[in-house]
Amino acid sequence: MHKFFVLLLLLPLSIFADIKIAVTYPYIGAIVKEISKDKVSTYVLAKGNWDPHFVVPRPSLIAKVRRVDGIIINGGELEIGWLPPLIKRASNSKIAKGSIGYLDLSRYIDFLDKPTKLDRADGDIHPDGNPHYHLDPKNILILAKAIKNYLIALDLDNKKEYETNYTSFVNLWNGKIKEWDKKMEDKKGIKIVQYHNNLAYFNNAYSLKTIGTIEPLPGIPPSSRHTMELINKIKAQKPSAILHDVYHSTKTAKFIASKTGIPVIIMPHDIESLDEIEDLVSLFDYLTSAIK
Ligand SMILES: [Zn+2]
């Protein structure tokens, strides 16, 4: 009996301790779950049906971030309005920028809509280019690899598990990409309108063309002048639909639809942005079925 307790004391702590990771958005949490299974506890900071640009850094979020071993962010300035004050107030050295626990996924992605050097006329909330890159399913594979390497660096003891889970995820995902490509084949080249250009990477992946947005510039609410111009553009160019996010009011979109006859289609951008979007696969299953 005595010997048993001595042995127990000698076991490495990592057997008992979960790693705790904060992630900014549900889609990141879902990738961490795929790679880590039960080895990591994940805290998702933003809800899936919130505007990802504007999250309120509530005290409960600060308390969570204070206790974690690492943080994974989307980056590309998507969290610029809410995460820096939250990290500052949590004062947790494990998640300081540049530390092993800090992972900025945007570093692995080639951005669309990168602004040209002297031109800042594209609004204020996409200063480095379009940060909504996770809606290209091929980018999910790049993110999964970055997250796998990050977890191994943070928790070498479980390296083998992370590698095995990563390989199964890549196999599953490659199969799904083929399926989604096939579903979207006849949508190639269709024109669409959006509220905010949060489908830029999805549209790029499947060759859909955005002819305009309901907001005049990223982050700027619709104006009647811009709405009238957009209605004229829709009448001239005949796009198939208005693809709309879940978190802005659809009032202007419905007005435009009533003047032009094109449908408004709600497009989820993250897990739990709609009730039926429970995981990464159902997110892309939904998106690739939404446009009729
Ligand atoms: Zn945006």
Image: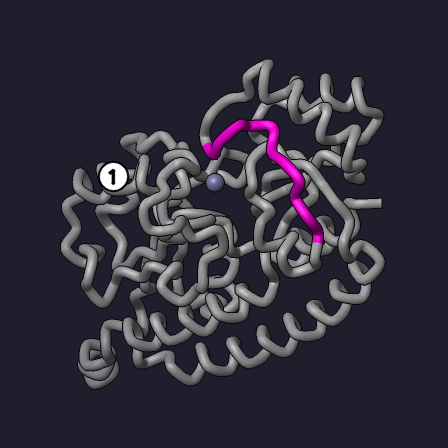
Range of the magenta residues? 208-218
Where on the picture, by quarter, is residue 62?
A: top left
Kind of residue at disc 1: Leu
Residue 184 shows in the view:
yes
In the image, residue 18 sits, relative to residue 198, either above or below, namely: below
Counting labels gives 1
Secondary structure at badge 1 equals helix
Where on the picture, by quarter, is residue 42?
A: bottom left
Residue 186 image position (x, y, % from top left): 84, 58
Q: Mark 1: is the Cβ under 8 angstroms from ligand 1?
A: no
> Which of 286/65 is in front?
286
Q: Residue at x 71, y 30 (%)?
A: 233
Category of crowding for the residue at label 1, using alpha-carbon neighbours closer than 10 angstroms: few (below 14), some (14–19), many (at least 20): some
As for residue 13 lying within the magenta part, the answer is no
Question: For mark 1, what is the residue?
Answer: 86
Say which quadrant the N terminus sits in.
bottom left
Say which quadrant the C terminus sits in.
top right
Q: Residue at x 73, y 49 (%)?
A: 286
Left/right placement of residue 194 relative to residue 3 reads: right
Left/right placement of residue 20 relative to residue 5 reads: right
Residue 119 image position (x, y, % from top left): 36, 43
Q: Residue at x 38, y 82 (%)?
A: 159
In the image, residue 214 sits, relative to residue 207, either above or below, namely: above
> Which of 167/245 is in front?
245
